[in-house]
Image (tube, rainbow, N blue to C red):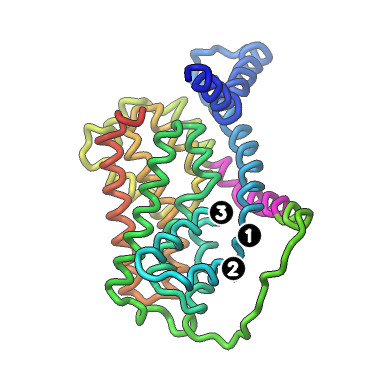
Amino acid sequence: MQIIRDIFVWLNDALLKMTWLQSMVNRLLLDGFQMDASSYLFKSLSFFFYDVIKIFILLSVLIYISSYIQTYFTPERSKQILTKFKGIPGNILGALLGTVTPFCSCSSIPIFIGFTRAGLPIGVTFSFLISSPLVDLASVILLASIFGWPIALTYVVFGLVIAVIGGTLIDWFKMDKYIADFVTTSNDEPRNLLLEQTKKERRRYALGEVKNIIKKVWIYILIGVGIGSIIHGYIPQSWIESVLGEQNPFSVLIATIVGVPMYADIFGTLPIAEALVMKGVGIGTVLAFMMAVTALSLPSIMLLKRVVKTKLLITFITIVVIGIVLTGYAFNAFSYLLI
């Protein structure tokens, strides 16, 4: 049993945390550029180069895998699956399908529109809309590479619970009438896009998705890692703890409010989250910030406002914010069980 555990730890360190990469970056800075290991600049540059390289390696591999899997779950195939389920089982399935679609909050909305036009229950579509930007294969692996598997898997559970409860409440509130008319009425002819693909075509699609998603998110990753490196190297820990530390009972609320106006996906927020945790911020506060950025960014709210009416939009935001805040406080209270 100990041998299996040792093998798992080695694989986790080598493939996810990439401790070898951290050593290479540090050695290059120390020996190649003769930097002082105790200097703020060394700490910032070490954090920046290590995180940038690690995230791009992991992201490329994970997008490829998740996109390959996604070829078996096209929107049309998903519609066929989801129409067979109603109520909470349908909401659970909608949330689970959101985990195999590596979309940000904005790009999830067109799929949401397609599901709604297909006649899927509103609860199912909103469960998908919530879970899609919050939880996917790539985000789980990246979270595990930074915070460990217990926290990553618990994050997934909370994300899915928020999605299922959110969809269930919106369904119970009978809010179908608050969806914009142009979404529920369409003159498009139904199309069957369930064409069987060869393995070569699936690989080509997955490689194309790697290129497309990297092209969209690379700037946010660099910005996120840049902010994280500044926090890690230069901002005093005492200042961060005074604002976002666990001794501040409003830290989760502050992190959630700060996260909503930002626009990034989870890959851009992870480096900031990592730096905040290193500065003593509670894991729940950090995860609340990440969830707010990914699920409730201001651009996505503005886009969603075009397809749903104000009452439904406010209900959606309220449910998700409450879910995020409760998740943050729960993680802060019980994170010692996961570390």
Main secondary structure of the magenta stretch: helix
Horizontal placement of 93 versus 252: left or right?
A: right
- Sequence-earlier tag: 3 or 2: 2
Q: Residues within 10 Å of mark 1 (few under 14, many from 20)?
A: some
- Sequence-earlier tag: 1 or 2: 1
- Sequence-earlier tag: 3 or 1: 1
Using the rendered view, name the quadrant where residue 295 is placed: bottom left
In the foreground, 229 or 65: 65
Q: In the image, which is nearer the foreground, mark 3 or mark 2? A: 2
Instruction: Identify residue type, mark 3.
Output: Pro
Label 1 close to label 2 by CB (< 8 Å): yes
266 in magenta: no
Mark 1 → mark 2, Cα distance in angstroms: 8 Å
Instruction: Identify residue type, mark 1.
Output: Tyr
Label 3 close to label 1 by CB (< 8 Å): no
**Magenta stretch in the rendered image:** 206-223
The residue that disc 3 covers is 102
The residue that disc 2 covers is 77
212 in magenta: yes
The x and y percentages for residue 284 are 32, 39
Q: Is residue 41 visible?
A: no
Using the rendered view, name the quadrant where residue 60 is placed: top right
User: Which residue is found at the position 39% from the left and 63% from the top?
Assistant: 89
Q: Residues within 10 Å of mark 3 (few under 14, many from 20)?
A: many
The x and y percentages for residue 261 are 40, 55
Horizontal placement of 212 versus 37: left or right?
A: right
The residue that disc 1 covers is 72
